[in-house]
Amino acid sequence: MNEQRCACNHCSCTVGDDAVVREGKAYCCEACANGHQEGEPCRMGDCKCAEATRPDEANVDNALDETFPASDPISP
């Protein structure tokens, strides 16, 4: 049997007969298939793919600083 890697970009797990299939791609678990939307960990405790999918807080803070406040008038 060929071992196939999980379709989660940062995951190092392999998938087997119990793979979660979404849009033709095989994932090792529901968390990977859902893109770790709520920060759920991968089924494998030593896999850190969930951490890699979280946005870097510094980038989020920087993006917030660069947005216009709601009080700015609309351009004519």
Image: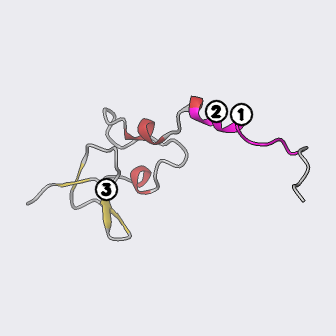
> Is 61 covered by the magenta stretch?
yes
In the image, residue 70 above or below residue 34: above
Q: CA distance from mark 3 to mark 2?
A: 30 Å
Taking 60 as reference, is 36 left or right? left
Q: Quadrant of residue 44?
A: top left
Residue farthest along the left direction in this orientation: 1
- Front position among marks 3 and 2: 2
Q: Residue at x 10, y 59 (%)?
A: 2
Relative image position of residue 73 (x, y in whole percent): 91, 49
Q: Which residue is mark 3?
A: 7
Q: Residue at x 70, y 38 (%)?
A: 66
Taking 8 as reference, is 41 left or right? right
Q: Quadrant of residue 45?
A: top left
Quadrant where the N terminus sits is: bottom left
Residue farthest along the top direction in this orientation: 58
Q: Which residues are magenta?
A: 59-70
| Mark 2 secondary-structure assignment | helix
Q: Which residue is mark 2?
A: 62
| Mark 1 secondary-structure assignment | helix
Crowding at mark 1 (Cα within 10 Å: few <14, some 14-19, many 20+): few
Amino acid marked by disc 1: Asp
Crowding at mark 2 (Cα within 10 Å: few <14, some 14-19, many 20+): few
Q: Earlier in the sequence, mark 3 or mark 2?
A: 3
Residues at badges 1 and 2 in contact (C-beta under 8 Å)?
yes
Q: Give whichever of 22, 53 is nearer the camera.
A: 53
Taking 54 as reference, is 19 left or right? left
- Return the mark for residue 65: 1
Q: CA distance from mark 1 to mark 3?
A: 34 Å
Crowding at mark 3 (Cα within 10 Å: few <14, some 14-19, many 20+): many
Q: Coloured how?
A: secondary structure
Taking 39 as reference, is 1 left or right? left
